Image: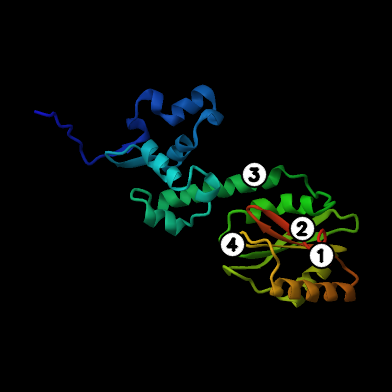
Amino acid sequence: MMATIETDNRAFRIHDLNDDDRPREKALRIGIQGLSNAELLAIIFGGGLPGKSVIQLSQEILRDHDNRLSRLAKMSIHEMSTKYKGIGPAKSISLAAAFELGIRCQADFAEEDPRICGSQDAYKLMYPHLCRLNYEEFWVLHLSHANRLISKECISGGGTASTLVDVKLLMKRAVDKLSSGLILVHNHPSGNLCPSTPDNQLTLRIKQACQILDIRLLDHLIVSSAGYFSYNDEGKL
């Protein structure tokens, strides 16, 4: 007669694991850098499901995203909490907070008031803000006469295929900040880096407004997770 294994309805938590499998204790022994992605997720989630440890749950979630954190980071709080049993709003918010802290930390590592010498510099500066979005955002980099960053700000966002930009408001902010130069940046969540007709029309309108106010329009970047398109590099300004 085959033996059966009885299980209860108790959710597996981190302290229910064997000592060698507990990610917190492992982090203390070897350092947080030594933990796998699943173990880091397990620390954030804290508990699993009846019959399934938090490590197993984390591994399954990662497999659903081809073991790529960049894809997992694109999930909304609502999607995470409704798709996975055992991952409610509280755990979903904790995960979103961890990703957001990572992005902000990466931004802090950047040089303060960096000098933007070309499209690559602008792309590296803006990639952390735009790489995981599944909707469009339009940003403006305000630069000094020496091309040092005065500020970066999101002008608009929310559309999956486009976003509205108020040119008058954009130029007012440039005047208020005494900007000598502007770099426009927006993302294409689809991954297509080719500028659309509305992209070209908007770029032309902003360029004409800049000429009137003696402000240099230095570039317009279209960003995706795969790279970027530069109007300046392609001779379209």
User: Circle 4 sits on which residue?
Assistant: 190
Please give left or right for residue 230 compared with residue 56 in the image: right
SS for dot 4: loop
**Residue 9 in picture, x, y percent from top left:** 22, 41
Q: Amino acid at mark 1?
A: Lys
The answer to which of marks 3 and 4 sits earlier in the sequence is 3
The answer to which of marks 1 and 3 sits earlier in the sequence is 3
In the picture, the disc for residue 151 is 2
Q: Amino acid at mark 3?
A: Cys
The answer to which of marks 3 and 2 sits earlier in the sequence is 3
Quadrant where the N terminus is found in the figure = top left
Q: Depth-wise, is mark 1 or mark 3 nearer the camera?
A: 3
User: Circle 1 sits on which residue?
Assistant: 177
Q: Amino acid at mark 4?
A: Ser
State the CA–CA distance, disc 3 to disc 4.
Answer: 26 Å
C-beta proximity under 8 Å, tags 1 and 2: yes
Q: Depth-wise, is mark 3 or mark 4 nearer the camera?
A: 4
Please give left or right for residue 156 compared with residue 8 in the image: right
Instruction: Depth check: give the residue in front, 119 or 104.
Output: 119
In the picture, the disc for residue 105 is 3
State the CA–CA distance, disc 4 to disc 1.
Answer: 33 Å
State the CA–CA distance, disc 4 to disc 2.
Answer: 27 Å
State the CA–CA distance, disc 3 to disc 2.
Answer: 17 Å
